Image (tube, grey):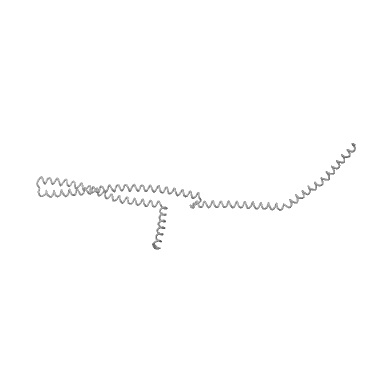
């Protein structure tokens, strides 16, 4: 196969795929077209059957007329035989044979026409039934398709994949509000950070003063402790001297 042949096959495949996709997307139009075509064929067949019925009715009338003519000819022939009318008798006999042949032909055609009418009437009934079935199939299929599309739309909405303009706009609003909330949170966090930094700076600046105060307090406490020790020793020595004096007097 040449290059152009392969290219044509590819193009036919693409075209067929696109046409098939369009037919699926416009299923209602495809169903309507098929139904209209069936209805058109139904009416065409109905007109044909109508013509067959008219022909059958005409054959029935012609057959009835021929039978009346045969009855009349037979009567005339009997009269000619009774009167021995040699001139009219043979003509009437010939006429009787012609009418009998005509009756046989009309009878055969009438029976054939009757069978055709009944056959095509059955076909009309089948076609009418198929049209009703196709209409019901259309309603059922379109309802199912609508249900499936709605289910897919809901699932896409839940999954955040909806492409409908209204839902897409709503998603944009939600996203915008979420971003606005995020900006507010960031601003609050930045504000808290600045305050924490200010407090930390104040604590660092106050740290030397606080340390000096604590150190002075420690020195003061230390000095107070050293002064208290000699005083306690003096009191203890005085107490020992008193006890010693009392002991000597007791001797």
Q: Nearer the viewer, residue 152 or 128?
A: 152
Residue 25 position, x and y percent, is 42, 53
Seen as rendered, the residue at the extreme top is 250
Quarter holding the C terminus is top right
Quarter holding the N terminus is bottom left
54 sits left or right of 27 in the view: left
Residue 91 position, x and y percent, is 13, 50
Residue 209 position, x and y percent, is 74, 52
Q: Nearer the viewer, residue 24 or 174?
A: 24
Q: Nearer the viewer, residue 63 or 30?
A: 30
> Residue 10 appears in which quarter of the rendering?
bottom left
Residue 194 position, x and y percent, is 65, 53
180 sits left or right of 29 in the view: right
178 sits left or right of 102 in the view: right
213 sits left or right of 112 in the view: right
Seen as rendered, the residue at the extreme bottom is 3
Count of numbered marks = 0
């Amino acid at each position: 196969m040449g290059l152009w042949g392969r290219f044509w096959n590819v193009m036919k495949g693409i075209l067929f795929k696109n046409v098939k996709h369009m037919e699926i997307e416009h299923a209602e139009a495809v169903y309507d077209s098929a139904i209209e075509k069936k209805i058109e064929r139904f009416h065409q067949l109905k007109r044909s059957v109508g013509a067959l019925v008219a022909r059958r009715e005409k054959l029935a009338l012609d057959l009835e007329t021929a039978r009346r003519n045969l009855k009349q000819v037979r009567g005339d022939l009997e009269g000619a035989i009774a009167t021995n009318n040699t001139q009219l008798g043979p003509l009437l006999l010939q006429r009787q044979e012609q009418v009998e042949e005509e009756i046989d032909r009309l009878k055969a055609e009438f029976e054939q026409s009757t069978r055709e009418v009944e056959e095509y009437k059955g076909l009309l009934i089948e076609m009418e039934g198929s049209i009703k079935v196709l209409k019901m199939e259309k309603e059922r299929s379109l309802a199912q398709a609508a249900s499936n599309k709605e289910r897919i739309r809901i699932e896409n909405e839940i999954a955040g994949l909806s492409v409908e303009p209204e839902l897409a706009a709503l998603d944009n609003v939600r996203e915008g509000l979420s971003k606005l909330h995020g900006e507010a949170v960031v601003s609050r966090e930045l504000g808290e950070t600045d305050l924490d930094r200010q407090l930390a700076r104040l604590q660092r600046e106050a740290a030397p003063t606080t340390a000096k105060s604590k150190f002075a307090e420690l020195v003061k406490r230390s000095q107070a402790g050293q002064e208290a020790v000699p005083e306690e020793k003096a009191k203890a020595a005085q107490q020992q001297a008193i006890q010693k004096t009392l002991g000597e007097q007791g001797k």
